[in-house]
Image (tube, helix red, strand yellow):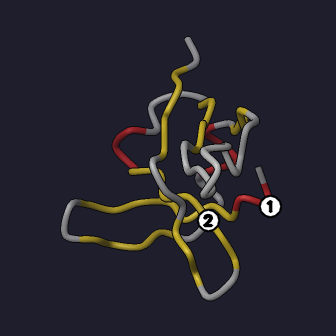
Amino acid sequence: MINTLTIKEPIWNGGQRAVGVRVDRLIDDLWIEIDTVDKHGNRIYPARYYITKQRASLYETKTYSWGEAYIIPIEDL
C-alpha cells in the first residue's frame, strides 16, 4: 500500500527547496503532495510526487527536535 504524505510548506534551503520526510514515517513508498500556495491561492506545486522508500533512503538526514528526517530536494521528485 502506498501512503500519501501532505507537506504544508517545503524547506527553503538557501534557494534549493526540499521536503523533509520523517524517517519513522517512511514505511513504504510515498506519494508526496505540497500544499503551499501563492498570493492568488494557486498551489505552487500542484502535482503529486512519487518516491520509493529505497530512493528516499539515499538522501541525507537531518535531526530536528521532533525527530530525524530525510531531506529530499523537490527537483529530484
Q: Residues within 10 Å of mark 1 (few under 14, many from 20)?
A: few
- Which residue is painted at 45% across and 31% down in the image? 27
- Count of numbered labels shown in the rendering: 2
Q: Which residue is outermost to the front?
A: 40
- Earlier in the chain: of badge 1 and badge 2, it is 2
Helix, strand or loop under label 2: strand
* Residue identified by numbered label 2: 18
Q: Quadrant of residue 43?
A: top right
- Which residue is painted at 69% across and 83% down in the image? 15
Relative to residue 26, is residue 51 drawn left or right?
right
Helix, strand or loop under label 1: helix
Q: 75 or 70: which is nearer to us?
A: 75
Q: 38 or 19: which is nearer to us?
A: 38
Name the disc covering residue 1, or none: none
For the residues labelled 1 and 2, say whether their Cβ atoms are less than 8 Å apart. Answer: no
* Residue identified by numbered label 1: 75
Q: Amino acid at mark 1?
A: Glu
Q: 58 or 72: which is nearer to us?
A: 72
Q: Which residue is outermost to the left?
A: 65
Relative to residue 75, is residue 62 drawn left or right?
left
Q: In the picture shown, does residue 36 fall above or below 1? A: below
Relative to residue 33, is residue 75 drawn left or right?
right
- Which residue is painted at 25% across and 60% down in the image? 67
Q: Residues within 10 Å of mark 2 (few under 14, many from 20)?
A: some
Q: In the picture shown, does residue 61 fall above or below 25? A: below
Q: Amino acid at mark 2?
A: Ala
Q: Position of residue 2 (x, y in %)?
A: 58, 18
Q: Position of residue 50 (x, y in %)?
A: 72, 34
Q: Position of residue 52 (x, y in %)?
A: 68, 36
